[in-house]
Amino acid sequence: MGMTVIEKILAAHSGRDQVTPGDIVDVMIDARIARDFGGANVVKHLEENQLSIDDTARTFFTFDCNPTGSDQKYAANQHRCRMYAKKEGIKVYDIDKGIGTHILMEEGLSYPGSTAVSTDSHANILGAVGAFGQGMGDKDIAVAWHKGATWFKVPSSVKIVLEGTLGPLLTAKDIALNLLEIFGASTLLGSAIEMDGEVVDKLSLDQRITIASMATEMGAIIILFRPNKEVIRYCESRTRKKVEPVLADEDAAYKEVYHVDVSEFECRISLPGKPHDTSVLPVEKVWIDSAFIGSCTNGRIEDLRAAAAVLKGRHVAEGVVLKIVPATDRVWLRCLEEGLIEVFKGSGALVSNAGCAGCAAGQVGQNGPGEITVSTGNRNFPGKQGQGEVYLASPAIVAASAVAGFITSSDSIPKVQEKREFEGYIEQSSKEQKDIHSASATTRPHEIEGRAWYIPMENIDTDMIFHNRHLSITDIAEMGQYTFGNLAGYEDFAKKVKPGDIVITGKNFGSGSSRQQAVDCFISLGVQCVLSESFGAIYERNAINAAFPIVSSGQIASLELEDGDVIRLNFETGVIHNVSKKIQLESAPFSDVQMEIYQNNGLF
């Protein structure tokens, strides 16, 4: 039986001739990255556990979350990383360089067939060049720095074949949003996607990056593109060596093969709260307060050229703030050379230095309570880009909307600026949380029993579990008080939960960012386990590595759960028992790796 692209890459990096979906392998990592917000925790793990660095030539820091240095805690974390880097001889791509995953491609550190991990849930963007990239929590990255490898479960592969002809106004972002409309956030959960077809062959590297960067929002492990000649030439110019793409075997086995006609695609935006909740333009008039162009999804030179084409000779609408952040310093300088910076400044835009921007708290792009933003980012979960509402769109739509003052396309900008009536803003106040529960040491039983906290919701992302404004916290004892603080209806969860409780939810629990805190906050509160229909891939790893029990079952509905029911779970047999209702079902038991780490009380 032949292998898919992901299977070939993982086999080649684990010393095996063959791997199949479900295999757990130790994967050698070519590039090992820690960012500024996760880097301090990586250093903490290495120092506390007295771990050495396997290969400093493959080990890097990238400071892209807060390159403006505008937050004291980020500044402290960056300084700690710099000091550690000096001591160990580790390369730092500092605040003047840009987004780490893009730096990997620019510096030739990631190329077709290579592997990379980062404390960035969008490290799978490297699928744009046919490389394996994966976002992981700080424990995983610390081990990768020490061992040079980390365990990984081989995912199933699906193939999406794009057919037909793309409309003249449609962009790569529209392709991504149309795919999200088709597949949602969990249809392809945990899968490695291979993109194929004549439409794909014609896509530029920048276009591939846009689509690949939204694999996380689709719940996928990665979206892998077969490198075309342009991508090969680019990678060879960056690596200064011959590059050979990894191609699937003709007899490779796929879980599913989807044929999608792009001729039916339409210009779309994502509505606030869910990237996969999309709508076709035009929409009912939505006035905006701010606009953002940038992020790892749309901060490339092609994206900024598209924005400049709309903005040239025009000015941002009165009362609208337009923020533009190139993905890397190379892109920024290219904008300067081509006169795009002059266009942006002439339109009234704020242009920042390169970096992640709005997705990361503390940098350009955040919005305030009641603020309406249209953004080129990949994520618009509540609170992710600030306290207001965020719509997602392509660079051309964002630029056009900034000029018009409301969400619209470039061919529908009114010739005369429309007057907007002042509507005022609603102040949003957060509840003060006083109870802080310390994590307590527990034994490692195969069977547990506890009170059910039943939350029948799907796609609970990590920003809902543990908001990004608390990411600088490194003490687990402080984390519990913020658990579900951004999940509507459960803001007081931390006050009501009791040690020993079991949280039960719907599909795709823990989607989104790679933050370890979204696991550790439950440990802080003494929650025994999370039972869900399925988990986000990075969250699943983080929980296993922290020895925090998680169990998945697609039959949770059969338990007829209510809050307060007594639930018993056996990790060795997979049996789940609603003791209160006398209903029992079977699920998958812990894997050998999960049980070993659980009994070891953690990855370390």
Image (tube, rainbow, N blue to C red):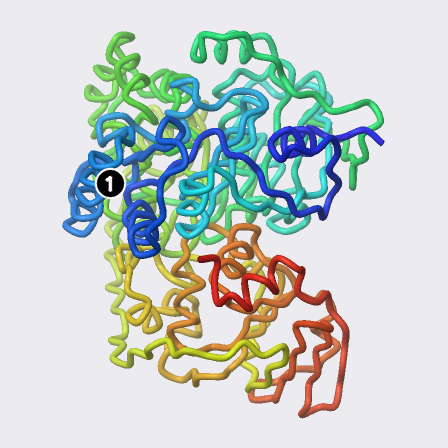
For image coordinates 39% across by 79% down, the residue present is 440
Q: Of helix, strand and loop, which one carries label 1?
A: loop
The C terminus, quarter of image: bottom left
- Is 16 left, or right, of 35 in this rendering? right
For image coordinates 40% across by 84% down, the residue present is 496
Q: Amino acid at mark 1?
A: Asn
For image coordinates 28% across by 21% down, the residue present is 329
Give the class, few, some or many, for how many residues have Cα within 10 Å of label 1's Cα (few <14, many ≥20): many
Image position of 278 with respect to 556: above or below: above
Task: Please name whichever residue, 179 or 506, is drawn nearer the observer in this view of the structure.
Answer: 506
Task: Please name whichever residue, 465 or 526, is drawn nearer the observer in this view of the structure.
Answer: 526
Is residue 475 in sight in this rendering? yes
- Is 73 left, or right, of 583 in this rendering? left
Is residue 413 in sight in this rendering? no
Quarter of the image where one finds residue 16: top right
For image coordinates 31% across by 52% down, the residue present is 41
Task: Please name whichever residue, 550 or 422, is drawn nearer the observer in this view of the structure.
Answer: 550
Residue 278: x, y in percent?
55, 44
Residue 285: x, y in percent?
42, 43
- The residue pinned by badge 1 equals 66
- Is 27 left, or right, of 23 in this rendering? left
Residue 93: x, y in percent?
28, 28
Quarter of the image where one finds residue 156: top right
Image position of 223 with respect to 243: above or below: below
Residue 568: x, y in percent?
65, 83
The N terminus, quarter of image: top right
Report the number of discs. 1
Image position of 544 with respect to 269: above or below: below
Task: Please name whichever residue, 303 or 265, is drawn nearer the observer in this view of the structure.
Answer: 303
